[in-house]
Each structure stands twice: as C-alpha cells, then as structure tokens.
Amino acid sequence: MLVLVATEDRRPTRILHIECSVLAFDRSGALDSDAESDKMKLAVSMLESGYVADDAPAVVNARRLFAKREFAHKYRWTPSKAVLRQVGDAIFGGVNGRGHG
C-alpha cells in the first residue's frame, strides 16, 4: 500500500492518494522478475498510443481497456473500510491523538 500524505509543519494533515498493489515473490523471497516484467508490459499497454486509424472509424481499439482490467485483476487490490481506518489511525492517531474516519 502506497499512501501519499499532505503535511503542514512536518505533520500529516490529510491523505491525498492511496494505491494498493500486489507484489509477487519467487521461491527465494525476491520480487518475481517475470511478474514485474508482465506488470510493466501491461502498464505500457494501458497508455494511449495517440494513433487513430482513419480508414476504420467504427472500430474501437479495446486493447487499452482489456490491459487495464487485467492489470487491476492481477496487480491491484481494494482495501476494506477496516484497513483504511487502520491506515488513518496509524497516520493521524499517533500524531495528535485523534482517530481518522
């Protein structure tokens, strides 16, 4: 989980963004290089190429959409409300005694 936090006077004031990713490990406990390579290929496939075929205006290129769905299925997860509450408590609760939620 990657959490981007805004701060004032070096104290967290709000959560700006949360990204939940899946990391794959090999048998030795290192990051799985094949999974990381697949993740990068899918990430590139999700980008717009900027190319539009003039001769086929009725054809929709769904490759980007399918890559985005596959990436989300393989490499993203959605935290529960309980997990989000724990993250907020960890960030804000220990700093000024107030819970997050």
Image (cartoon, rainbow, N blue to C red):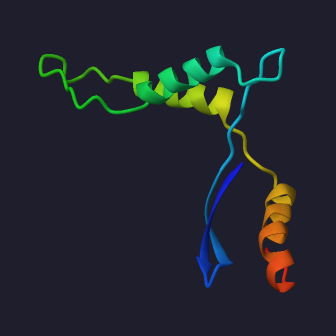
Residue 94 lies, with reference to residue 47, above or below; the image says below
Give the residue drawn at x 72%, y 48%: 1
Which of 2/60 is in front? Answer: 2
In the rendering, at what x and y percent does residue 27 appear?
84, 14
Residue 43 lies, with reference to residue 88, above or below; the image says above
In the rendering, at what x and y percent does residue 98 appear?
84, 83
Residue 72 lies, with reference to residue 87, above or below; the image says above
Which of 3/76 is in front? Answer: 3
Give the residue drawn at x 42%, y 24%: 45
**The C terminus, quarter of image:** bottom right
Which of 83/36 is in front? Answer: 36
Left or right: 56 with respect to 94?
left
Which of 62/11 is in front? Answer: 11
Left or right: 97 with respect to 64?
right
Give the residue drawn at x 83%, y 65%: 85
Q: Quadrant of residue 13?
A: bottom right
In the rendering, at what x and y percent does residue 42 appear?
50, 24
Left or right: 10 with respect to 30?
left
Q: Quadrant of residue 20?
A: top right
Q: Quadrant of residue 39?
A: top right
Farthest residue, direction left: 54
In the rendering, at what x and y percent does residue 78 appear?
73, 45
